[in-house]
Image (spheres, rainbow, N blue to C red):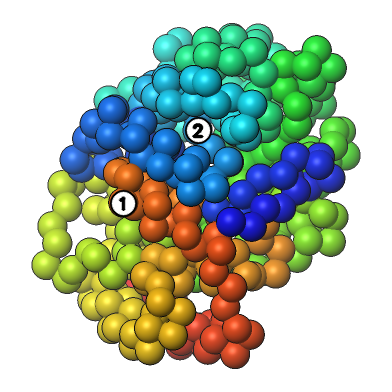
Amino acid sequence: MQYRSLGASGIEASIVGLGTWVTGGGEVWGADPEDQESVRAIHAALDAGVNLIDTAPGYGWGRSESVVGQAIQGRRDSVVIATKCGLIWDDDRGSPFVVLNGKMIRRSLRPDTIVEEIERSLRYLGTDYIDLYQTHWPAIPPDNTPIDETMAALLKLKEAGTIREIGVCNCSLAELKENEAVASIASHQFRYSMLWRDAEQDILPYCAQQEIATLTYMSLEQGLLTGKIGIDRQFNENEFRANEEWNPWFKRENRQKVLDLLAGWSPMTEKYDCSLAQLAIAWTAAQHGVTHVLVGARNTSQAVDNAAAGALCLETQDIESIRGDVEALGTPV
């Protein structure tokens, strides 16, 4: 496993991190995960060298954090825990965002909700500090908390030792700079994969220049880049993968293009003795500005397979060849 610092923090985190969005379950994931299998998957990832675990209160309304907390008992000192604040669902504070699993999710980066969220996260995770505390989404009108008020609340937590570093998620470049102007930002988390490369235009070059760590999510495009989701696979209407706006590559005609692409990489998987998932993760980690790649796992075999990508170093010509192939796919319609 390779390790890189979370920005200038000095916190060394595995380049392959365990994302626990799926661990929270819910109808959006289709088959619901089994908590004890999730615990085993976390243990397998840790045993394979992964030390970065990313979670959030909104992943299953605390379920993901609780499972992570159970899994890291007795191993807390060797784990870099990243969790988040900014999404609430149990009252009408904040700005309406999205309905998920029958609940209205609201964005709130108000100091009062942050204090409530951190206390709950600490309880669920069974710890007295968070290594990386991230704003899950920027605030939006009508309850558009000024960034300086949000950051003042987070800096107070940092001064108290409750959190070690501050990160942001899902920000535009302008929003990232606004946060940076008020507080030291260790990391930025956003969607990025070989099929979803928007961040290459601005976010990734800027973070590389400013030495801000980047945590990419959906880098396997919810399993599509593993090659294990066939053309005839059906999804429930409430699953993320059935949402063609969120996941246009899952349209039948686009999925076939991706599957054909992956089939053409057999010589490379043989060359590196790796799976397609490992190839995609290693390629992502090799891109300019990418420091850490978050990948979910439903079971131990997925966790072990994903972790092994952290030791895979691709040759420059193969990195460039893969880029040429994915760019040739064009934009999904």
Q: Where is residue 296 drawn, in percent x and y?
A: 41, 47
The quadrant holding residue 141 is: top right
Q: Residue at x 36, y 70 (%)?
A: 275
Whether residue 104 is visible to the viewer of this picture, yes or no, is no
Q: Which residue matches tag 2?
A: 55
In which quadrant of the rendered view does residue 200 lie?
bottom right
Per the rendering, the mark at residue 301 is: 1
Q: Is the C-beta separation of discs 2 and 1 under 8 Å?
A: no
Gap in angstroms between the C-alphas marked 2 and 1: 20 Å
Q: Nearer the viewer, residue 71 or 66?
A: 71
Mark 2 against mark 1, which lies toward the viewer?
1
Q: Position of residue 249 (x, y in %)?
A: 33, 67
Instruction: Classify mark 1: residues with Cα within 10 Å, few (<14), some (14-19) or many (20+).
Output: some
Viewport quadrant of the C terminus: bottom left
Report x, y in % for residue 297: 36, 46
What secondary structure is found at the residue carrying circle 1?
helix
* Camera-nearest residue between 51 and 260: 51
Locate residue 222 relative to residue 207 in the image: left or right: left
Instruction: Specify few, some or many for label 2: CA neighbours under 10 Å numbering under 14, 14-19, or 20 or more.
Output: many
Q: Is residue 173 above or below residue 328?
A: above
Amino acid at circle 2: Thr
